[in-house]
Amino acid sequence: MGNRIITISREFGSGGRTIGRMAAEKLGIPCYDQELIEKIAEETGMLKSYVESNVEDVQGGWLSVLAGRDYYGHSPQDDLHAAQTKVIRELADKSSCVIIGRCADSILGDYDVLKVFIHASMEKRAERIVNQYGETAEDPIQRLKDKDKKRKAYYQLYSDRKWGAMENYHVALDSGVLGVERCAEIISQLY
């Protein structure tokens, strides 16, 4: 049997990163999130800060995606996505693991993957980003909407699927109702 992979797609502030790390720890397998940024930066030779700010977002929405393309329809974002795809596939080939975000569910569609979507109510997510990340300078609800909008545009651009549509995932968990610990436990049991 080959490697088993868990992909965690998530709404901003839902605790998906924490849940993924907890599930990986319970299962004794690696979890990749921020580590992907470092590997993509190494792969492309781009600055880590550039990769971090561009690897999972479509900056400025759809108009900027179109405006940032050359005559042939290619953009620097496409180069990042190609490097990201290569890194994610290499990690999945290497060992069983948990991969957070970055279209991994789509990229690894032909692998043995448990595809998870973590969501929560707007109120629970706003509470979480204020308490966990100290987000106070900007209206937390607006920050959630902006971040989710960018993730949605990025996902749809590079997967040709609708972000958050339940038919794209095996399981969807409401972390606001279940709590992060219970979500991690459910994922580890499903693995």
Image (spheres, grey):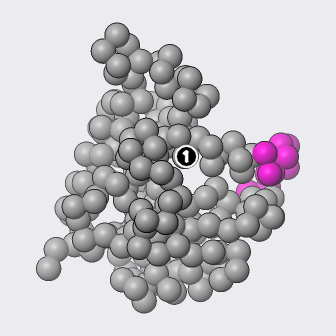
Q: Decide: is 11 above or below 138.
A: below
Q: Residue at x 42, y 30 (%)?
A: 77
In this orientation, which residue lies closer to the viewer: 182 or 36? 182
Q: Quick check: 80 left or right of 149? A: left
Based on the displayed image, in which of its 4 quarters is residue 70 positioned? top left
x, y percent for residue 157: 43, 38
Q: Which residues are magenta?
A: 131-142
Based on the displayed image, in which of its 4 quarters is residue 97 positioned? bottom left
Q: Among all residues in the image, which is located at the extreme left?
A: 1
x, y percent for residue 82: 30, 37
- Which residue position is annotated with label 1? 151
Q: Decide: is 35 above or below 14.
A: above
Based on the displayed image, in which of its 4 quarters is residue 133 positioned? bottom right
Q: Residue at x 38, y 46 (%)?
A: 159
Which quadrant, please, contains the N terminus? Answer: bottom left
Numbered circles on residues, count: 1
Q: Decide: is 71 above or below 128.
A: above
- Amino acid carrying mark 1 in the image: Arg
Q: Among all residues in the image, which is located at the extreme top?
A: 71
x, y percent for residue 81: 36, 38
Q: Quick check: 179 left or right of 80? A: right
